[in-house]
Amino acid sequence: MTQTMVLDIVRQGFFTIIIVSLPVLLTSMAVGLVISILQAVTQVQEQTLSFVPKLIAVMLALVIFGNFMLNQLISLANSMFRIIENIV
């Protein structure tokens, strides 16, 4: 195994982590921004007001994007198994 192969595996892993986590993070950030704007406008500073909608939005994002995220992780695992198979 060469140094370029290791760096390629690390790059592929980081790229997969970014791709898999992006839908949930963007959903959480968007909902958090909207709730923060509503709290600033109405001057209601309640902690549960920001927590509960984010939790619901993240659950919905996991339901909607779960198949895509799982396919990305399976693709990474398959490529790692192919690399291991070629090494031995």
Image: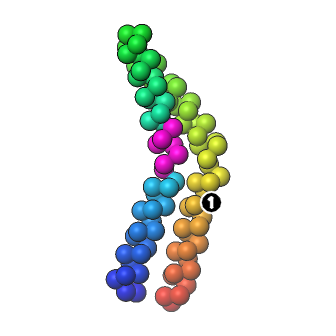
Residue 78, x across and y down, in percent:
59, 72
Q: Amino acid at mark 1?
A: Asn
Q: Residue at x 50, y 55 (%)?
A: 19
Q: Residue at x 53, y 87 (%)?
A: 86
Residue 73, x across and y down, in percent:
56, 61
Q: Is residue 65 above or below residue 18?
A: above
Residue 81, x across and y down, in percent:
55, 77
Q: What residue did someone put label 1 on?
A: 71
Q: Residue at x 47, y 33 (%)?
A: 30
Q: Main secondary structure of the magenta part?
A: helix
Quarter occupied by residue 42: top left
Q: Residue at x 48, y 48 (%)?
A: 22
Residue 15, x across and y down, in percent:
45, 62
Q: Is residue 46 magenta?
A: no
Is 22 in front, or is 80? Answer: 22
Relative to residue 8, is residue 82 drawn left or right?
right
Q: Label 1's element? A: helix
Relative to residue 72, is residue 50 drawn left or right?
left
Asked whether residue 48 is in view, the answer is: no
Asked whether residue 7 is in view, the answer is: yes
Quarter occupied by residue 45: top left
Magenta extent: 21-27
Image quadrant containing the N terminus? bottom left
Q: Is residue 88 above or below residue 20?
A: below
> Farthest bottom residue?
88
